[in-house]
Amino acid sequence: MTTLLKRFTNILFSLRTTLWLSGFMLALMLAGAFIMPSQKEFETIHSTPMFEWLKIQPIAITWWLWSLIGVLTLLTVNTLFCSVESIIKKRKVTRWPLLISPQIIHIGFLFMLFAHLMSAIGSYQKFAVVQEGSMLRISDNVVLKVKDINIQSDYNGYITDWKVGIEYLKEGKELSADTILPNSPSLRTGFNINVKDLQAYPYEAVLLQVSREPGAVWALAGSVLFMVGIITLIALKIRMER
Amino acid sequence: MLALSLALYLLALWKRPLLYAGLVLQVAYIISRGIQLERLPLVGPHDTLIFLAASIVAFSIPFGVLLKEKKQFFNVVTISASVFTVLVMISKQHNSPLPPVLRTFWFEFHVVLAFMSYALFGIAAILGYFDLTAKESSTEGLHYRAVLIGYCLFTLSMIFGGIWAYLAWGTYWMWTPKELWTSILWLFYSFYLHARLSQWWTDRPMAYLAITGFAITMFTYLGVSLLMKSSHSF
């Protein structure tokens, strides 16, 4: 039993395992990169949370995604075990930033994986074509009203700028007002409201997108940690070489 | 200007200082495009290829200084830059105004960082090629450095892209061919960086990884845009 446990932990703490798992991930993603563009079903992948979407799609086209989830789970465990083992083994080093920075990179990576997990459980996008005066229920008691649509075009008909004024209403009373601009969505209680497309003629209308992205904050936090870790590591390596 | 920079690059195979003259000319071309378009000229194959060609030459300079057999290295860099310059000359310029969604520094930084990292991956591939063919001591340390810095810039490019996507389209990640291939590229270089810590992956295997990585880079950049339908297409 002890031998078996020792063997099991050796595999978990192993860089070789990391490399094998990464290799499997690459192969699965390569498969997906060719399956995805050829299957129409993937056009609806963003409309519902990914796990909900996966449950109803044929396994013939989603096997690589399911396998990827499995491999990522193993990679998460491997990353955690390797990081802890690294810290324990090298805890007496004097250059502790060199010990810590790769682990900060790993924590950032794990945060990003968590972000994708949160998004796979709870993210979705919904669309609605709206004009000035249109109303849209975005949650149980909050309604979005499109106050005004302003589209500017040049002499060739290219849209050069736009803005959409909106207000949030609850039981007919205004809660707040906001303006949606290019790259400046309206954010309200976990919802991201932005403009997907616009039409200036024959009447002004916009394709409004209401999306939920619960993983966004975790992705940002993971990105920051990852970059802090990798920049620290590069700076330390340069210093060591000098 | 492009034809002249190509001529300078080709002549640089005999006189290396002409390589730097070609680089100056290409940078001047990029700046003139920027002034003409009143924006950063980084949309479409024409503008992105010239940026890549100039970046490869620019990044080759500090790496070349550290090599013993500089001439061969700079010759391969010159040929690479020349090939990209020829592709620029046959590509159509994208002169139409940018749609409002592309007028943000998130997009500009995302693209600039991506191409700088592609150039570094290209340098790593060239150094990897020398590891396999040249007589001098291993360049593994150098191509590792190129990959590490390229990986850092590429990660930052992906982060900027994710932030921009969230602001523009409500999500930091979309299942499109470009995003998937970008992730494959990022994962590949993550594999490279971890493989280097392992005793079985030294010298020749690392060189092969560096070369393969650049092949994936080129497919991610050009192959996906030209062969697959994606919101990321030129």
Image: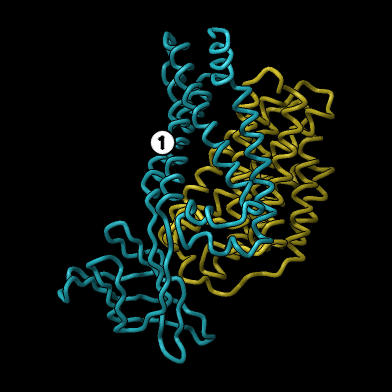
Image quadrant holding the C terminus of chain A, namely top right
Left or right of B216 in this view: A14: left
Toward which corner of the image does residue A206 lie, by quadrant? bottom left
Element class at badge 1: helix
Residue A230 in view in this figure? yes
Circle 1 crowding by C-alpha within 10 Å: few under 14, some 14–19, many from 20: many
Q: Where's residue B149, x and y in %?
A: 57, 36
Q: Which residue occupies 36% across, 70% down?
A: A181
- Residue positioned 46% across, 65% down in the render: B103
**Image coords of residue B107 (percent x, y):** 49, 58
Residue type at numbered disc 1: Leu
Chain B appears what colour?
yellow
Q: Tell me the chain of label 1.
A: A
The quarter holding residue B94 reads: bottom right
Above or below for B21 versus B141: below
Q: Is residue B80 left or right of residue A8?
A: right
Of residues B13 and A149, the one nearer the viewer is A149
Residue A23 percent coordinates (x, y): 66, 34
Q: Is residue A19 above or below residue A144?
A: above
Where's residue A5, x and y in %? 53, 13
Say left or right for B109 vs B198. left
Residue at image x 46%, y 75%? Answer: A197
Residue designated by label 1: A225
Going 47% across and 51% down the picture, which residue do you hit? B160
Chain represented in cyan:
A
Q: Is residue A98 above or below residue B47?
A: above
